[in-house]
Each structure stands twice: as C-alpha cells, then as structure tokens.
Image (cartoon, rainbow, N blue to C red):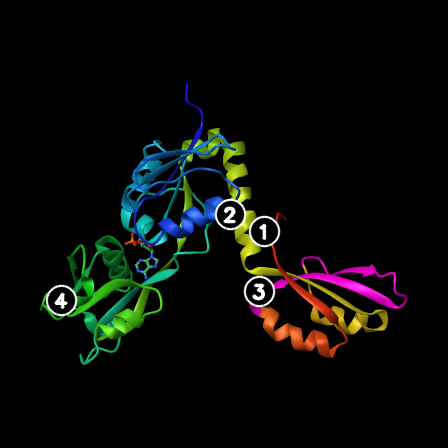
C-alpha cells in the first residue's frame, strides 16, 4: 500500500517557480526535472505530482492527490468546493474588467446589454449576475486583451498583476471581479482522515511564509536608551534585551517587518543604537 501523501503542483506557467521555491525553502528535498511527473521527497513521506495548473483542482477533488497548489481564480472558475488550507503569499493578481481606453464606458453598470470576453466565464457570469448587470459572456481561451480590437466584445475580464500590460494593450480598467493568489487546497476526505500529516505540511509551509516578510534585527545600545529603542521595536512578543559584558551596554534583538527596516534604521541610530545587524529569518513557528 502506498500511503505517502501526494501534493499536486503546476508543471507549467507562473506558479511553478515560486511553488518549487516554497517547497525547497520549507526544507523538502526532492529533484524536479521538467520530464518527471512525480518527485519523491527524500526527507518526508510525500510525493509531488507535477500536473497542468488547471488539472490540480481535479486531481485533488478526485483524491489522486491529497493536497494541491493552484490559483484562487482557477478554483473559483472550476466551481469545485475544496477546503482552502491557506493562501501562499505569491501569484498575486486580480480578475479585472477593462474596456478600450477610448470607449465611453466608465463603470460596470454601463456594460448592461454588452459583450464581455474572458477566459473565466463562470466567475464573470456570477459577478455580473450579482451586480444585476445583464451581459453576454463570450468565453475565449487566450489573448483576451485583443477581443475588443477584433470586434468580439465591448469589454473583457482578465487577470492582471500590476495592470501595466492591460494599459499597454490600450485598455482601461473599470472594476475588479476577484483578488487572487496561490492557495493550498486539500481533498476533503484527506483533510479528515490524514489531518496530522496535512497539519505537518501546513506548519512547514506557514513557517516559511511567515518568515518571508520579516527580518531579525540585532543592535547594541547604552542601557539608558532602552525605553526609547523599545518604543520603536514591537518584535514578536517585544524585543529581547541582553546585558553585555561592557557595563551600561545592552544588546537588543527584535523581529520587524521587512518593509519597515529601511525606515527604522536611521531612527534606531538616532535613538542611540550602534552595530545594527539585519538578518534574514528562515522560519517562524508560532
Ligand atoms: P499561467 O499558468 O502562467 O497561465 O497562470 C496560472 C495562474 O497564475 C493564474 O491562474 C493565476 O492564478 C496566477 N497569476 C499570477 N499572476 C498572474 C498574472 N499577472 N496574469 C495571469 N495569471 C497570473
């Protein structure tokens, strides 16, 4: 009996590289070559199945895999109701409604009675139905952004991340349908029956994701400056304060948001800190 857990991940497209990075960062040791369908993880009872991004959901639904990595947009479009274990913090994008830049339409309501081309027809239909704006949804599978120029539709619903590609294509966004990012999904029976093993994987991945947007700060300071420095440093549960051999001096260690570091450094220096080190954090388990 093969009782290794199975995780389905995309084998092509944008989610491949960040997914492999996450699994490697989590400490899973496996070889992934383009040709292999299955990679055996050497240090965990887990097999990784490389499948088309669109097929991940069916693999998990049909219990061919216990877990899967896919996009929220694809999950919504599939209509398959799989438990979402956790968002993964990459593959961020949104389904956006856009019209040609020179068209007269400014709002979603104005699209009533018009045609909307998209590769996400189910999500688009539900969105416009919920807005009570009747439109004709034109399903197309690629090059959605050229549909208005080809005379196929007056508007489109397409995935964007920054939105700049849409603008380069002469389109103007007028509303958002759905925010999306990569998500870890589970087969419902596996979630019940193999809860402990699934929780172990979730903890592994969560520890990496939690650490990604944090930095570890270490600095020395005169002990009289502690209050002032502490006010600048929240940390996970407040900073650690360690006495130094040099009388009247302390070391302060703290975890801060990676985005805050550059703003914090001059303020810490100004408040008396010296020898400040900024270190990456590999994992955080809380
Ligand atoms: P792909 O296989 O490259 O077509 O994309 C698969 C998934 O990547 C999409 O379904 C989204 O969940 C995600 N994604 C992230 N950013 C973008 C983007 N800018 N455009 C399209 N898809 C994106």
Cα distance, mark 4 to mark 2? Answer: 44 Å
**Mark 3 highlights which residue?**
258
Q: Residues within 10 Å of mark 2 (few under 14, many from 20)?
A: some
Left or right: residue 258 compared with residue 229: left
Mark before the other along the chain sequence, 1 or 3:
3
**Mark 2 highlights which residue?**
25
Q: Is residue 180 visible?
A: yes
Q: Residue furthest right?
A: 247
Mark 4 or 3: in front is 3
Could you tell me residue 54's position as x and y percent? 28, 45
**Mark 1 highlights which residue?**
282
Mark before the other along the chain sequence, 4 or 3:
4
Q: Which mark is residue 153?
A: 4
- The image quadrant where one finds ligand 1 is bottom left
Disc 4 beta carbon < 8 A from ligand 1?
Answer: no
Q: Residues within 10 Å of mark 3 (few under 14, many from 20)?
A: some
User: What secondary structure is marked by label 1?
Assistant: loop
Q: Residues within 10 Å of mark 4 (few under 14, many from 20)?
A: many
């Amino acid at each position: 009996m093969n009782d290794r857990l199975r995780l389905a991940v995309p084998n092509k497209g944008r989610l491949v590289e960040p997914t492999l990075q996450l699994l490697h960062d989590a400490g899973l040791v496996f070889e992934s070559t383009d040709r292999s369908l299955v990679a055996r993880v050497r240090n965990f009872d887990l097999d990784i199945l490389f499948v088309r991004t669109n097929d991940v959901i069916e693999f998990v639904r049909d219990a061919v895999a216990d877990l899967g990595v896919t996009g929220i947009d694809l999950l919504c479009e599939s209509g398959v109701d799989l438990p979402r274990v956790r968002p993964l913090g990459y593959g961020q994008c949104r389904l956006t409604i856009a019209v040609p830049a020179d068209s007269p339409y400014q709002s979603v309501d104005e699209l009533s009675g018009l045609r909307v081309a998209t590769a996400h027809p189910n999500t688009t239909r539900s969105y416009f139905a919920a807005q009570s704006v009747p439109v004709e949804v034109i399903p197309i599978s690629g090059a959605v952004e050229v549909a208005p120029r080809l005379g196929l539709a007056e508007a489109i619903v397409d995935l964007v991340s920054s939105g700049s590609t849409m603008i380069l294509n002469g389109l103007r966004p007028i509303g958002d349908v759905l925010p999306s990012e990569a998500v870890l999904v589970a087969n419902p029976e596996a979630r019940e029956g193999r809860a402990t093993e699934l929780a172990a994987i979730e903890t592994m991945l969560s520890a990496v994701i939690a650490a990604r947007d944090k930095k570890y700060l270490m600095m020395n300071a005169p002990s009289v400056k502690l209050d002032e420095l502490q006010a600048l440093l929240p940390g996970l549960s407040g900073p650690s304060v360690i006495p130094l051999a040099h009388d009247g001096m302390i070391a302060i260690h703290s975890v801060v948001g990676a985005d805050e570091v550059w703003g914090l450094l001059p303020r810490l220096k100004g408040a008396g800190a010296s020898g400040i080190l900024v270190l990456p954090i590999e994992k955080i388990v809380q």
